[in-house]
Image (tube, grey):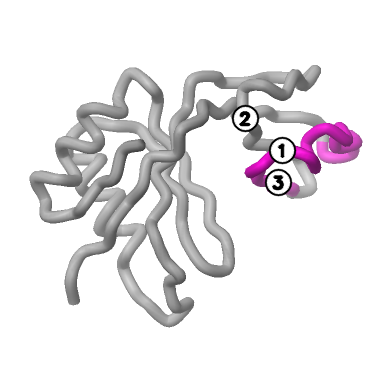
């Protein structure tokens, strides 16, 4: 099976942590792309850095590499293989998934090293 193609999204993201009972700010829903994760302990929001959110904690300057899909849910090991390439390059990741694909977030300062490591391992990386 050939390795996947990843595309670097042109925007920067912020990862926010809020109390689990916090309301999601309305402007999140008008963003071109966002991710919401909720557990009993917390609410996590991944949003473009143009959206200001008053959160308990936040981490800025993330860039997203989208695995171009759609990917079939029965496909095995895609996240593990890409994650291992980035781990070997000492690059921290934050991963979010949708029904059709995965997004690997890396810090802006690590983006060049991430794309180089993936390219050297046989992945095609598209940078706009």
Answer with mark 3 or mark 1, whichever residue precedes in sequence.
Answer: 1
On the picture, is 47 further left or further right than 119? right
Answer with mark 1 or mark 2, whichever residue precedes in sequence.
Answer: 1
Distance, label 3 to label 1, CA atoms, is 12 Å
Q: Which residue is mark 1?
A: 31
Q: Which residue is mark 2?
A: 48
The C terminus: image quadrant? top left
Q: Is residue 72 visible?
A: yes
Where in the figure is residue 39, as x and y percent of width and height? 74, 49
Specify the segment rendered in magenta: 20-38
Q: Which residue is mark 3?
A: 36
Q: Which mark is residue 82?
A: none
Q: Residue at x 89, y 39 (%)?
A: 21
- 42 or 47, nearer to the observer: 47
| CB within 8 Å, label 1 to label 2 | yes
Q: Alpha-carbon neighbours of circle 1 within 10 Å: few (<14), some, or many (≥20)?
A: few
Where in the figure is residue 56, as x and y percent of width and height? 75, 20
Distance, label 1 to label 2, CA atoms, is 7 Å
Where in the figure is residue 19, as x and y percent of width and height? 82, 32
Which image quadrant for residue 80?
A: bottom left
Indicate the secondary structure of the residue bearing disc 2: strand
Q: Within the magenta stretch, is there residue 84?
A: no
């Amino acid at each position: 099976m050939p390795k996947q193609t990843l595309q670097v999204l042109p925007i920067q993201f912020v990862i926010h942590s809020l109390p689990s009972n916090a309301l999601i700010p309305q402007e999140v829903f008008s963003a071109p792309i966002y991710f919401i994760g909720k557990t009993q302990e917390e609410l996590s929001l991944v949003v473009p850095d143009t959206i200001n959110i008053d959160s308990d904690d936040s981490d800025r300057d993330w860039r997203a590499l989208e695995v171009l899909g759609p990917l079939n849910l029965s496909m095995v090991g895609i996240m593990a293989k890409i994650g291992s390439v980035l781990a070997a390059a000492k690059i921290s990741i934050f991963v979010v998934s949708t029904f059709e694909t995965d997004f690997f977030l890396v810090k802006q300062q690590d983006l060049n090293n991430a794309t180089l490591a993936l390219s050297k391992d046989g992945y095609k990386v598209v940078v706009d």
